[in-house]
Image: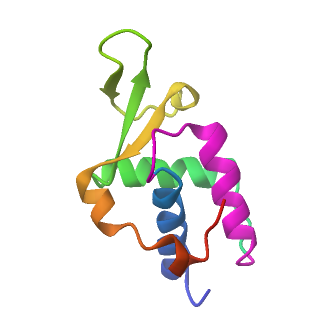
Amino acid sequence: MDSADDRAALVKDLVLVSMADDYENLEIIIPHVTKWANTRGLELSRDQVIETLRAVVCEGYAQCYLLSPWPPHATVVAFDPEKVDAFYFYLTPRGKQIVKNTEMLGVNE
């Protein structure tokens, strides 16, 4: 990576791609993002991934949800680092517009 800004942008892209297809929780997001980052020579901690999630939520690219088997099945909630393990994340329409092609990122499950 050329700079901290390039690294942060890449991590943001990887986090957004990790939740592009479905509601995803930390159990899914963290392993995918850290694996994809590792293939690029980057090591990320759980806290770094959570901080990036907070950033993409604050920037309006994703939202936090509590999911339930009963209506309403998905309820938007504010990001709370104390409750982050209970949340699911999904892209907003704005977030979907900026997600890069996963093939271009070299991301595969």
78 or 89: nearer the viewer = 89
Q: Residue at x 67, y 68 (%)?
A: 37
- Where residue 54 appears, as percent x and y from the top left, is 44, 47
Q: Residue at x 55, y 86 (%)?
A: 3
Q: Residue at x 64, y 66 (%)?
A: 108
Please tell me whether residue 25 belongs to the stretch shown in magenta: yes
Write the start and end of the magenta stretch as one range.
Answer: 20-41
Point out the image quarter for the N terminus: bottom right
Left or right relative to 27: residue 65: left
Residue 107 drawn above or below residue 90: below
- Where residue 17 appears, as percent x and y from the top left, is 49, 60
Left or right relative to 66: residue 49: right
Point out the image quarter for the C terminus: bottom right
Q: Residue at x 28, y 65 (%)?
A: 97
The image quarter in which residue 68 lies:
top left
Q: So how many labels did they put on this image?
A: 0
42 or 107: nearer the viewer = 107
The image quarter in which residue 77 lies:
top left
Residue 33 drawn above or below residue 3: above
The image quarter in which residue 32 lies:
bottom right
Residue lying furthest top in this view? 70
